Amino acid sequence: MSSTMTPPTSMVAHAAETENVPAPVPVPASLDELVKLLHAELGTKGLACEGVNVDRVKALMSNYVSNEEDWRKYAHFDKNRYTRNLVDDGNGMFNLMILAWPETVGSAIHDHSGSHCIMKILDGELQETLYDWPDKVINETDHPSDSGVGSDNSDDDSKEKEKITPMNIKKETIMHRNECAYMSDQLGLHRVSNPLKTRGSLSLHLYTPPYETCKTFNERSSKARSSGKCVYYSSRGEKLESCPAYRTCSLTSDPYKQQ
């Protein structure tokens, strides 16, 4: 005759706890290995998808230790604006790129068109300035409707002036080599810039989902405009012929800096 032994309650609880313990976050030995691990972690999903642990993906990028041998071929600089250099186009739900920032150059204030971003500093330093969203997003081409009071639209001018409100800075952070940050539209708008006066900086960006256009904002008036298409300066280390189109994008430099 055989008998069935019921395991002690403590053993059952321990087994359940073990099943729920997440696997350790790997430490990528190289940028190429990081790319493979991101594919494995995200599969066919992006950061906003159910079941994806944003903190775990951020930890994965944080665990990669910047190595110039890995990213040297992506470090394409332009004189007066930052460049977007594609590393991997992901699974259709994310892409990975290296941004090269000349000394004192920064982006425009911008949103992320619903995308989520994890940014890691590879070399140098970057300053992130976080802004509140304006109470109402007004495009630069928008004008208040004619009130019908006076042919000179003086009432309209007054209303227009009331709407010109400087943007509010929430936070400023200096990020150093190997530090990571997360950004999404839910957190606000931001500008990223290289505060260093004598050298360039490099950063690694994971975007999910990828985006081609966004809105850029005038810090003094809070008004927005389309960035134009955000193109790559290089792809997998090779400079692209389309890179002159970079100069039509208002995201890769601050178009309001001299105003």
Image (cartoon, rainbow, N blue to C red):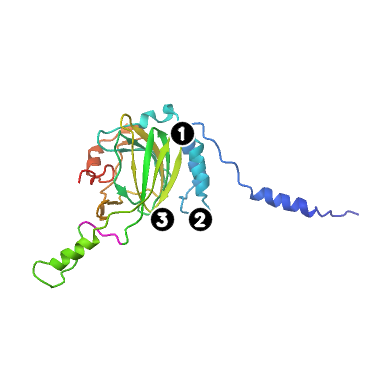
Mark 2 highlights which residue? 50
* Upstream in sequence: badge 3 or badge 2: 2
Crowd tier of the residue under label 1, counting other residues whose Cα lies within 10 Å: few below 14, some 14–19, many 20 or above = few
At x 37%, y 41%, the residue is 127
Instruction: Answer whether labels 3 and 2 touch (C-beta < 8 Å).
Output: no
Three-letter code for the amino acid on which mark 1 is drawn: Asp
The image quarter in which residue 247 lies: top left
Specify the quadrant that holds the N terminus.
bottom right
Mark 1 highlights which residue? 32
How far from the left and from the top, in percent, is residue 194? 33, 37
Mark 2 secondary-structure assignment: loop
Crowd tier of the residue under label 3, counting other residues whose Cα lies within 10 Å: few below 14, some 14–19, many 20 or above = few
Three-letter code for the amino acid on which mark 3 is drawn: Gln
Q: What is the span of residues highlighted in magenta in the rendered image?
A: 136-140
* Upstream in sequence: badge 3 or badge 1: 1
The image quarter in which residue 6 lies: bottom right
Determine the CA span between mark 3 and mark 1: 31 Å
Mark 3 secondary-structure assignment: helix
Determine the CA span between mark 3 and mark 2: 17 Å
Asked whether the viewer can see residue 93, the reply is no
Is 43 contained in the magenta span? no
Mark 1 secondary-structure assignment: helix
In the rendering, which numbered label is found on residue 244?
A: none
Mark 3 highlights which residue? 186
In the rendered view, does 143 fall on the left or right side of 211? left
Most common SS among magenta residues: loop
At x 25%, y 37%, the residue is 243
* For residue 14, above or below residue 120: below
